[in-house]
């Protein structure tokens, strides 16, 4: 599938990472690729699944969420829920930015934002650790997010 992506596709993808809201004409002018070509390639990349969605990178602190943390989760294999479903349920929780199944000493990692350390504590102790499938967790607060 990767052989279907050429240099122009990669230029468009790279541009979209930093300027996803730009108009097609701006992308065209910046990359010196005709507008129709940019449009057609973006549509093809989206339809073929290379581009999954267009999104925004929020400044959570400005939105009032001053605490950000990674939480490592050990899956309880005796649970009535499978690991993938647990991960999807975690991803759907309020203030969870992402949830991923990983390998190593931990099974799942989530990224969450909270308004305060008290809110983070309540999230971990009252919501996360009471979920079926969560054996244990380790919370890692983030001092500064670079990307």
Image (spheres, rainbow, N blue to C red):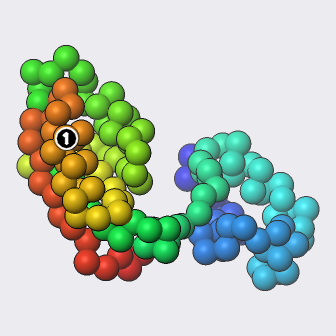
Q: Residue at x 21, y 49 (%)?
A: 122
Work out whether 26 lies above or below 120: below
- Residue 118 is situated, as x and y percent measured from the top left of the image, at 22, 59
Work out whether 51 lies above or below 107: below
Side of 44 relative to 145 (left or right): right
- Residue 70 is situated, as x and y percent measured from the top left of the image, at 25, 59
Q: What residue is shown with label 1?
A: 126
Q: Residue at x 24, y 39 (%)?
A: 127
Q: Residue at x 68, y 67 (%)?
A: 20
Mark 1, Cα crowd under 10 Å, few <14 / some 14-19 / many 20+, is: few
Nearest the camera: 25 or 132? 132
Residue 68 visible in image:
no
Side of 83 relative to 60 (left or right): left
Side of 96 relative to 53 (left or right): left
The part of the image, by quadrant, that contains residue 80 is top left
Residue sitting at the far top: 80
């Amino acid at each position: 599938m990767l052989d279907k992506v050429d240099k122009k596709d990669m230029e468009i993808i790279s541009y979209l990472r930093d300027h996803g809201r730009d108009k097609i004409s701006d992308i065209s002018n910046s990359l010196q690729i005709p507008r129709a070509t940019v449009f057609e390639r973006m549509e093809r990349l989206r339809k073929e699944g290379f581009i999954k969605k267009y999104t925004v990178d929020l400044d959570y602190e400005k939105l009032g969420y001053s605490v950000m943390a990674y939480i490592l989760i050990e899956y309880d294999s005796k649970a009535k829920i499978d690991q993938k479903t647990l991960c999807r349920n975690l991803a759907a929780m309020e203030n969870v930015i992402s949830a991923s199944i990983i390998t190593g000493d931990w099974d799942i990692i989530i990224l969450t934002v909270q308004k305060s350390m008290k809110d983070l504590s309540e999230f971990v102790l009252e919501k996360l650790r009471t979920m079926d499938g969560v054996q244990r967790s380790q919370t890692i607060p983030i001092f500064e997010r670079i990307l």
